[in-house]
Image (cartoon, rainbow, N blue to C red):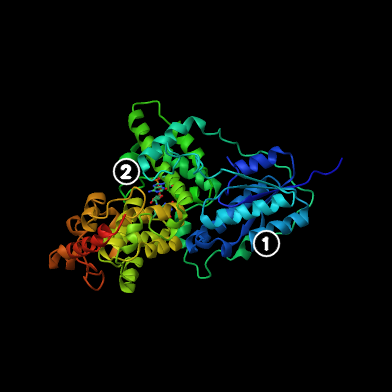
Amino acid sequence: MPRMAVAIVWFRSDLRLHDNPALSDAIKTGAPIIPMFIHSPDEEAEAAPGAASRWWLANSLRALDVALRKLGGGLVIRRGRAADAIAALIRETGATAVYWNRRYEPAIIARDGRIKAQLQQRGISAESHNGSLLFEPWEISTQDGRPYRVYTPFSKACFAREPHLRPLLPAPKKIPWPAAWPKSLEIDDLQLEPRIDWAAGFRDTWSPGEAGAAATLRRFESAVVADYSTSRDIPGVVGTSRLSPHLHFGEISPLMVWREVSTCAPKDSTRIAHSDGGSTFRNELLWREFAHHLLYHFPRTVAEPLDARFATFPRKHDARGLKAWQSGQTGFPIVDAGMRELWHTGWMHNRVRMVAASLLVKHLLIPWQAGAAWFWDTLVDADLANNTLGWQWIAGCGADAAPFFRIFNPTLQGEKFDPDGLYVRRWVPELAELPVRYIHNPSSAPEDVVRSAGVLLGKTYPAPIVDHAAARSAALAAYEHVKRAAP
Ligand SMILES: Cc1cc2nc3c(=O)[nH]c(=O)nc-3n(C[C@H](O)[C@H](O)[C@H](O)COP(=O)(O)OP(=O)(O)OC[C@H]3O[C@@H](n4cnc5c(N)ncnc54)[C@H](O)[C@@H]3O)c2cc1C
């Protein structure tokens, strides 16, 4: 009997075996499978992973490789231009088909389109699937067929399409493998991890890989989702899922999360609270969908404001301010706590992301793109769609964005969302001994209180780098330019 030609499954942002449409479809053909990963940052433009994401990627690839080895196979690792790497693997193995799950970053869409066309021209079957979103960006549109720019009607349209969601796909129990394996680089050869090891805090915090993602979802379901509607805004407690890096790298699919949270209604009296938390949570997952919808339909927003009037906004190039913000030395405790949590763990709580981002773009008037670039390099969940939406939302220039004139007071935000100062005490230990009354505003404390807490303002902890009231007025004056610009 002639041997069946092999099929390549090209893993990208779908580093899992469960609910993986490309893998399932390839296995269905009965062809021997070669799982492949290609590291090609040079052609990924703004989607090329930053330092924190590279750490995650290395560990996630290891986990996927182990999972494939348990089934008797493994992950073939290559690097360089994806088209070249795929062509080489086809030459070496005689593969006649390539399967992958789609990504939505502009440079990746363009590259993948070229690869698909080249493969098809050569008579190689090229099949792409949706493995990363609940709905394709083109499946949801307004009544007149246009993309949405406002979240609420977008989310309603998603809920209306819920019955069309496909069934979940089980992880394969067996995968047919080729008789001979092509050569592969080691994951270490990709040099994804830092040469000077700064990742200890990451290792203490995260378990990259499919098993880590499943455990994170289980923890969320059993301990967090019931209170999610209220706890999600309190950075001092574990009140959110912390699934974002797992979702970004596709170690779990949004459909798995959506289905799991939809069916986890408890049998007892906590039902109402639980389902309420679940529905708030599903709305957050739809913000992720909305972000991808916007990135797909408005790819220029990676670098430019969606609201073109904001191109006239007078911005500052303030290297000192940027450095103070990056290093958690702004003198606003809630912001500094967030920036240090980010540096130490590669993640920051959503409420604090909003307050920290707002300080950068509204108080310091630094371009949102500079903040987005820092987040890109330091977040383990750095995601082009979510990061772009998050920054443009805060800067007031994105879809359905926060109005620019609503300017967070970072001190009041701290007092409201970190009322006991738990979060600040954890991440800004030099303030830990301050009484709760002053923890979010150390410079308002009487001198003897500051001294007995061991704080030397201006030495062990900085005074605020800007005065809130003056910065607010300056921001509103700058906003006048936008109001005058033609729509
Ligand atoms: C300035 C700024 C930058 C951001 N950059 C990123 C980024 O690079 N990557 C990223 O994944 N998220 C980003 N976010 C969104 C949000 O802060 C994170 O998704 C969230 O904090 C992740 O924690 P979690 O998984 O515990 O969230 P949960 O509250 O448990 O939410 C579940 C999931 O829903 C999605 N989600 C939640 N909130 C949002 C949101 N506002 N926008 C889009 N998706 C959302 C995420 O996938 C998240 O994992 C950013 C927000 C801001 C304000």
Residue 317 location, x and y as percent?
A: 33, 71
Say few, some or many: other residues with alpha carbon within 10 Å of mark 2 (under 14 / 14 to 19 / 20 or more): some
Q: Amino acid at mark 1?
A: Leu
Residue at the (47%, 35%) spot, across then down: 260
Residue at the (55%, 60%) spot, across then down: 44
Marks 2 and 1: in contact by CB < 8 Å? no
Residue 99 drawn above or below residue 394: above
SS for tag 1? loop
| 160 sits to left or right of 448 | right
Cβ at disc 2 under 8 Å from ligand 1: no
- Cα distance between the residues tagged 1 and 2: 44 Å
Residue 183 location, x and y as percent?
A: 73, 59
Q: Amino acid at mark 2?
A: Ser
Residue 355: which quarter of the image?
Answer: bottom left
Residue at the (33%, 69%) spot, across then down: 322
Residue 449: which quarter of the image?
Answer: bottom left
Q: Nearer the viewer, residue 26 or 137?
A: 137
Residue 185, numbered label:
1
Q: Nearer the viewer, residue 199 or 183?
A: 183
Q: Nearer the viewer, residue 90 or 53?
A: 90
Residue 231, numbered label:
2
Quadrant of the image containing the N terminus? top right
